[in-house]
């Protein structure tokens, strides 16, 4: 895909790798709708990235608000001018990066049920809900489109005290594989990414930091590579990790 002039949606865009995805895409002259809850951080990011970055203050778990935003942004005479033909009817986004997510950890007999529910809603259900709104527009497109779901190595391997988080990321893996098979004949690529430890606030909050963590910019550059692959070339899964997760001998 040639990224210049394309339109992308990035959830969880206000910080971490979401902000890095937004930065990398705007540098490629791609128009980015960055979705997050924190308006101040979104506005700060816009001041850094310029007018190609469009802040969208939304909670991905507010499904009614999300549906209204998609309708208002991509349909009718008020549709996104960056992706609309001359008659005003939008062709919709070319790229969807489902990045928003959170982790709440604890032993199974200590994890509050509401924490389980919050992770399920944010990490899995919100991905389904936004994706089902975007897919019809992508199906109607006459070009190749791309959906990128950000899972985790926790979607490949279970570990103690993160069973709820594991369940959401394993679920996203299955959802992505099924979606890839469902949509490939519509020229819609689906890629699921499984990152290991990245130097972001997520790991600062939950521990597990070490000197050799991946950089968010490296993950973003990998996503750019995926998006720029030839139209008939699909990488449906990719795992990325630090080469040396701990200093030798530790």
Image (cartoon, rainbow, N blue to C red):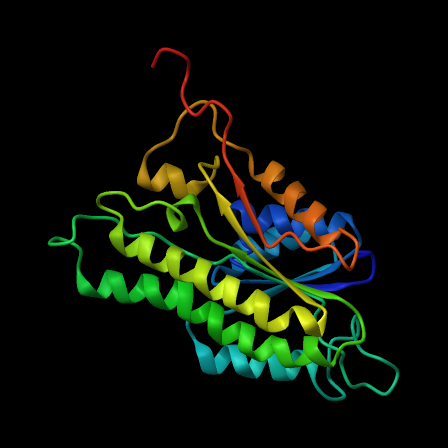
Q: How many numbered dots are placed on residues in this image?
A: 0
- Residue name at image x 50 percent, y 69 percent: 58
> Residue 41: x and y, percent?
54, 53
> Residue 79: x and y, percent?
73, 81
Task: From this view, report whether residue 68 is shown above or below residue 202.
Answer: below
- Residue name at image x 47 percent, y 72 percent: 128
> Residue 117: x and y, percent?
27, 67
Q: Quadrant of residue 170?
A: bottom left
Which image quarter is the C terminus in?
top left
In the image: residue 247, left or right of residue 85: left
Query: Is residue 59 visible in the rendered structure shown here?
Result: no
Q: Quadrant of residue 46?
A: bottom right
Query: Is residue 209 visible in the rendered structure shown here?
Result: yes
Residue 40 versus residue 163: which sits nearer the camera?
163
> Residue 140: x and y, percent?
73, 81
Residue 68 versus residue 224: which sits nearer the camera?
224
């Amino acid at each position: 895909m040639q990224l210049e002039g394309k339109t992308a949606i990035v959830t969880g865009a206000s910080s971490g790798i979401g902000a890095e995805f937004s930065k990398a895409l705007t540098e490629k002259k791609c128009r980015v709708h960055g979705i997050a809850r924190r308006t101040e951080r979104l506005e700060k990011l816009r001041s850094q990235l310029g007018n190609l970055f469009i802040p969208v203050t939304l909670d991905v778990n507010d499904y009614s608000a999300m549906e209204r935003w998609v309708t208002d942004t991509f349909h009718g005479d008020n549709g996104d001018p960056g992706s609309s033909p001359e008659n005003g009817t939008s062709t919709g986004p070319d790229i969807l990066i489902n990045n928003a997510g959170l982790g709440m950890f604890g032993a199974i007999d200590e994890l509050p049920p509401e924490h389980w529910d919050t992770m399920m809603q944010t990490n899995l259900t919100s991905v389904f809900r936004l994706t089902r709104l975007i897919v019809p527009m992508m199906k109607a497109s006459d070009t190749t489109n791309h959906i990128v779901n950000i899972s985790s190595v926790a979607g490949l391997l279970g570990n103690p005290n993160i069973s709820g988080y594991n369940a959401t990321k394993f679920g996203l893996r299955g959802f992505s594989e099924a979606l890839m098979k469902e949509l490939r004949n519509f020229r819609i690529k689906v890629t699921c990414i499984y990152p290991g430890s990245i130097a972001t606030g997520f790991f600062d909050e939950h521990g597990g930091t070490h000197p050799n963590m991946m950089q968010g910019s490296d993950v973003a550059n990998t996503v750019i590579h995926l998006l720029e692959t030839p139209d008939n070339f699909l990488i449906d899964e990719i795992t990325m990790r630090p080469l040396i997760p701990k200093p030798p001998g530790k």
